[in-house]
Image (tube, coloured by chain):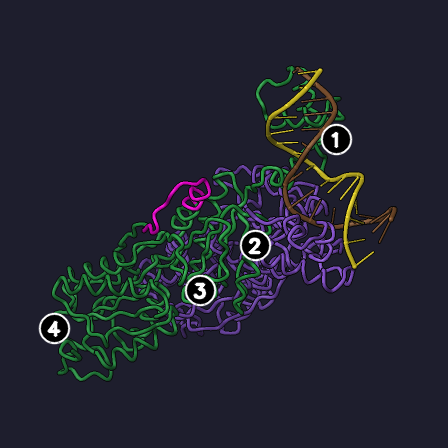
Chain colours: A green, B purple, C yellow, D brown
Amino acid sequence: MYASIKHVAARAGVSFQTASKVLNGQPGVVSPATNERILSAARELGYVPNALARGLVHQASTTIGILSDDFSDQAIGRFVTGAQHSVDRAGHTALVVSTPPGGDHSTPLRRLQEHRVQGILVIAPSLEGDPRLAEALPSTVPLLSLSHIAGAKVPVVGSDHRKTGALVAEHLVSLGHTQVATVIGSRNRQVTHSRLKGFQAALEAAGVTLDPTAVVEGDWTGAGARAAVHRLLDAHPGVTAIFAQNDVMALGVLRALAERGTRVPDDCSVVGCDDLEIAEFVTPPLTTVRIPFEDTGAHAAAQLLKLVRGEKVPSRSLLPVTFVERGSTARPPPRRRSASRTSAPTKSPRKTGR
Amino acid sequence: MYASIKHVAARAGVSFQTASKVLNGQPGVVSPATNERILSAARELGYVPNALARGLVHQASTTIGILSDDFSDQAIGRFVTGAQHSVDRAGHTALVVSTPPGGDHSTPLRRLQEHRVQGILVIAPSLEGDPRLAEALPSTVPLLSLSHIAGAKVPVVGSDHRKTGALVAEHLVSLGHTQVATVIGSRNRQVTHSRLKGFQAALEAAGVTLDPTAVVEGDWTGAGARAAVHRLLDAHPGVTAIFAQNDVMALGVLRALAERGTRVPDDCSVVGCDDLEIAEFVTPPLTTVRIPFEDTGAHAAAQLLKLVRGEKVPSRSLLPVTFVERGSTARPPPRRRSASRTSAPTKSPRKTGR
DNA sequence: CTGAAAGCGCTTACAG
DNA sequence: CTGAAAGCGCTTACAG
C-alpha cells in the first residue's frame, strides 16, 4: 500500500541504503544530483516513512502513552487535551487508552507497553485510592501522574489546591464573612482534603472558625451539593457564605438557595471552583477559582518528556491558580437575618459544635 | 529493556520460532510440557510482545488515528472520549493528534500515516469549511468524519440536527408560542443551518412564522448570545420564546433576560441545546435537547472500524437526540406584555420584515 | 512436535 | 560518493 524505501531507491536508481540516508536528511553524503533524484522519487511515490520499522531499529518509539480513567469527570478531557497537545508539540504522538468502567487497569497498560511507549502519563483521579493501579503500573518506562497514586511513588503534577482554598477564604474574610460553610468533593480524593485544609487554615489565620458540621459533602455533583446545602442550612441558618469545591456543585448550591428564597449574593455569597466556561454566564455570575486544566496536562506531559530524556523532575509540581471575582459574592447582610424557612433566628450557629 | 521472544526461548530451551507459536496461542502445536515451560519463562521475564515488530510483519498495525481540531469546542473532548473508548473495546489503540491553532493539517496527518494507523477519524468541526483539510487528507486509509468535509467525500456520523430544531419548535408551538426567536451558532457550520432549518420548518408546519430578523448570531458563546439577545429584544420586544443552539448560549440568553428584568419562563421561555451537566442546575433548570456526544464518537469509531474491515457503511448516519423539558419553558404570558425597557408595545414584530 | 529460513521496512556501522 | 552486511523483534510457510 505505502511505498517503501526500496521503491523509492529503485525509482531513483540507487541502493535502498543510500535512499535511506538522503531521506533522513544526512548532510551532503550524496551528490546533489542523486540527492535530487531520490527526493523527487519519494515525492512522486508519496513516500511516508514507517515509524514502526524505525522504532524497531532505534529500539525506541516516538510515542507517549496516556492512561485515563473513565472520564466521569469533565476535567479529565481537558487534562488529556493539554497533555496531547504538549506531546504533539514535542514531535511525539500520544497513544490514549482508558481503564474500563469495571476497573481492569492492566489491559490498557499492557497495550501501551506493547506499543513501546516511551513514558506513561496517568490521568486518573478517580483511581487515586485504588491499590490495583499501583500494582498494574509498569516499571519499564517513566511514569508521571496528575493525582497521587497510592502505593507507588510516581511524580505528580497538579494545581495548588491548598492555595485554592486559601484564596477563597481570604476573599470571604475580606468581605467580612464569619459564618461560612463549604461543600466538599468526595472524601477519597486528596484534592478534597487539600482544598479544605487550605480553606480552613486561612480562615483560622483570620480568626474565623469553620464549624466541622458546616463542612458537607456534595460528591462533586450538582444534585449532591443541592441536597447537602438544604441539610446544611437547616442546621446552620446563619451561614452567609458557601464555598463549593467545584463549579458544578456551586450551581447546586445556587439552586438550593433559590429554592429557599435566599438571595445571592445579598443574603448569602457563593464561591465555586474550576471556572468553567459557563461560570461567567450563570446568574449571578459565579465567583470562582480558575484551575488551569489544559496547562496542567501540558506541563505534566512536558515533565514526562523530560523524564524520558533522562532528566530529573521534582516529585511534585503545583501550578498556580487564579481567583476570579464575579457577582456571586458580596459583604454579608448587615445583621444576622436568616433566609431559611426552617430557621430559628435566635440560634447562633457560630457557637454550635466545638 | 524489554525481554524479547529470544530471551524467552533461550530460557525455555527452545527455538524462538517455537516460542513465538505458543506465545501466540497456537493450539497444541507443541507438547504440553514445552508449552508450559515457554509460558512460565515468558511470565518470569515479564515478556510483552512488541507491537511494532508485529505490525511490521503483519503489514498492519492495530491502531486507529484520531485527528481533532484545537478543542476550542468543549464537545470535542466528549466526542474523542467516546471514540477512544470504542477503539479500545475493539482491541485497537487510539493515536490522537490535533491540528495546531495556526492550521497546519498535514503534519499531524502525516504523523498518523507514519504510524500506519488503520483508519483516521476526523473530529474537527471548526475545520468544516477549510479546503486545505480535504487536500491534506490521505487516500491510503479509510476515513470517517464527525462533520462534513468540504471537497472530500468522507462518510459522516453525527446527530440529527434538523430533528433537534424540530423538537424545539414543536415544544414551543404546543405551549402556544407564536413570537419566537433563535440564537444560532456560527454560519460557517452546517449544524447551524440544519438546526435552523428544522426549527423553521416545524414552526411553519404549525402556522408560525419565524421572522428572519428574529434569527440572530451568537457565535456559540455566552457573550455572543447575550449581546445578540439585547439587540434582538430591542427590535422585537414581543418575543416570548428563544431557542439557543447550544446551552452555553442559552446561559447568555438567560443572562441578558435577567439584565432586562424579563422573567424566565413567565415572560419569556428559553431552550438550549446539548444538555450539559450543568443544564439541570441553572436557575431555572434549562429545557434543552440532549446531544449524545460520547455515543456519537463511539458510533463513529465503530463505523470506521467497519470500513477498516472492508465492510460498507452509509455515507451519513444520524444518531437520535432527546428533548429534555425542564423549567425554562412555559406558556407565553397571557397578553402581549413587553419586558423590554426600550420596547414600543404597540409594535407587532410578527408583521415586521417580509 | 520442533527448528531453520526468509522477510516485514528501516538504520547504522563498515567497505570500497 | 555509493553499496553490501547485519540486525531490530517478530510471524509465516516449509522442512524434518
Left or right relative to A350: residue B180? right
Identify the chain of the residue marked 2, using the numbered disc in the image. B
Residue type for callout 2: Val
**Residue at the spot x=55%, y=41% of the render?**
A62
Quadrant assignment for the N terminus of chain A? top right
Mark 4 vs 2: CB contact within 8 A: no
Rendering coords of residue A132 (x, y %): 48, 66
Count neighbours of disc 1 (C-alpha within 10 A) and say few if under 14, some if 14 to 19, many if 20 or more. Answer: some
Residues at marks 2 and 1, CA–CA distance in whole angstroms: 44 Å
In magenta stretch: residue A311: yes
Name the residue: 62% across, 46% down: B149
For the residues labelled 3 and 1, the Cα–Cα distance comes to: 49 Å
Q: Position of residue A232 (x, y in %)?
A: 26, 78
Are both tags, 1 and 4, on one chain? Answer: yes
Farthest front residue in view: B13
**Residue A123 shows in this picture:** yes
Residue B326, located in which quarter of the rendered image?
bottom left
Out of B251 and B93, give the one closest to the viewer: B93
Callout 3: helix, strand or loop?
helix
The residue labelled by disc 4 is A335
Q: Nearer the viewer, residue A26 or B171?
A: A26
Marks 4/3: CA–CA distance? 45 Å
Q: Is residue B117 magenta?
A: no
The numbered mark, 3 or 1, whose residue comes first in the sequence reads 1
Question: Where does label 2 land, which residue?
Answer: B191
Asked if badges 2 and 1 are on one and the same chain, I answer: no
Q: Cα distance, mark 4 to mark 2? A: 52 Å
**Which tag is nearer the camera, tag 4 or tag 3?**
3
Residue type of the residue flagged with mark 1 = His
Tell me the residue that label 3 is attached to: A127
User: What secondary structure is marked by label 2?
Assistant: helix
Compared with residue D15, is residue B214 higher up or lower down, i.e. above or below? below
